[in-house]
């Protein structure tokens, strides 16, 4: 099964590289807005160092449209979080359902104030882990200029589910000002930069690796960065 997934990832990598060259930009989530933000971790007590830790970090958040479709159309939305450092942490979450199990199912949305889930599982000493983000407050537009005006100050609740346990809150992200320009080159890679104590695992992680590598090569981006 693993060999089939790896082969599928290599197969998909070919059109992804071609699309990257044609667009001259990210093949996936090409349109987005980057914000400064503050991550406040309150701790989970789940046996996973990064999720259990408390503290405050200045971070970056990118909210994006997966296919780059016009804002009037539903799209697979993305919530990307970068915790800078010598060993950065990247979380890549996609718009999903809101139920216990549908958290792992991608769903097309128009409103950026939707539920986001990791979809890709993580492996840990405490068992499999899934992550989620839930913006609070009212609706958020996805059009770049409107999102840039509406998002600052918005609080996003971060949660995790460990093994078969329930979703539990481990922190919040408070969005700050949009960057100038609104969507500079800022790669994210959830496979190479997982939180300490977590390992990107499962078929989706194996599928992503060759696709990410193809996008990096087509864009001339250094090995340690990703396509989104």
Image: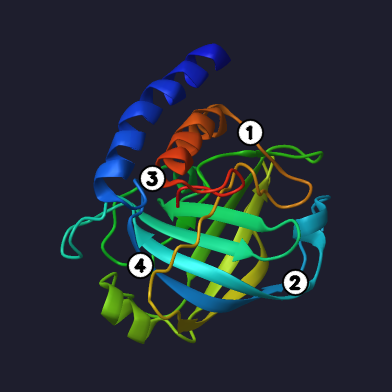
Give me the C-alpha separation between circle 4 and circle 1: 27 Å
| Residue at x 53% of width, y 72% of height | 156
* Element at label 3: loop
Nearer the N terminus, badge 3 or badge 4? 3
Q: Is residue 65 left or right of residue 42?
A: left
Count the marks: 4
Give me the C-alpha separation between circle 1 and circle 2: 25 Å
Nearer the N terminus, badge 4 or badge 1? 4
Give me the C-alpha separation between circle 4 and circle 2: 24 Å
Q: Which is in the foreground here, disc 1 or disc 2? A: 1
Q: Residues within 10 Å of mark 3 (few under 14, many from 20)?
A: some
Give me the C-alpha separation between circle 3 and circle 4: 14 Å
Q: Please give the residue where the numbered disc 3 appears in the rendered image.
A: 106
Q: Please give the residue where the numbered disc 1 appears in the rendered image.
A: 201
* Element at label 2: loop
Q: Nearer the viewer, residue 70 or 46?
A: 70
Nearer the N terminus, badge 1 or badge 3? 3
Residue 63: x and y, percent?
41, 65
Task: Say above or below: 218 vs 170.
Answer: above
Give me the C-alpha separation between circle 1 and circle 3: 18 Å
């Amino acid at each position: 099964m693993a060999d089939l997934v790896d082969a599928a990832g290599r197969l998909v990598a070919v059109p992804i590289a071609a699309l990257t060259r044609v667009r001259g930009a990210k093949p996936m989530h090409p349109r987005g807005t980057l914000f400064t933000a503050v991550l406040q971790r309150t701790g989970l007590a789940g046996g996973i160092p990064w999720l259990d830790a408390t503290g405050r970090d200045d971070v970056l958040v990118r909210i994006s449209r997966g296919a780059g479709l016009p804002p009037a159309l539903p799209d697979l939305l993305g919530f990307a979080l970068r915790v800078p450092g010598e060993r950065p942490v990247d979380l890549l979450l996609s718009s999903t359902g809101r139920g216990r199990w549908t958290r792992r199912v991608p769903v097309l949305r128009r409103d950026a104030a939707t539920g986001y889930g990791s979809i890709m599982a993580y492996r840990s000493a405490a068992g499999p882990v899934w992550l989620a983000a839930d913006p609070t407050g009212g609706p958020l537009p996805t059009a770049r200029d409107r999102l840039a005006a509406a998002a600052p100050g918005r609080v996003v609740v971060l949660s995790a589910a460990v093994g078969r346990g329930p979703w539990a809150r481990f922190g919040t992200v408070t969005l700050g000002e949009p960057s100038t320009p609104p969507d500079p080159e800022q790669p994210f890679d959830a496979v190479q930069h997982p939180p300490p104590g977590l390992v990107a695992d499962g078929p989706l992680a194996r599928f992503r690796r060759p696709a990410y590598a193809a996008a990096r090569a087509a864009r001339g981006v250094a090995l340690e960065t990703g396509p989104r």
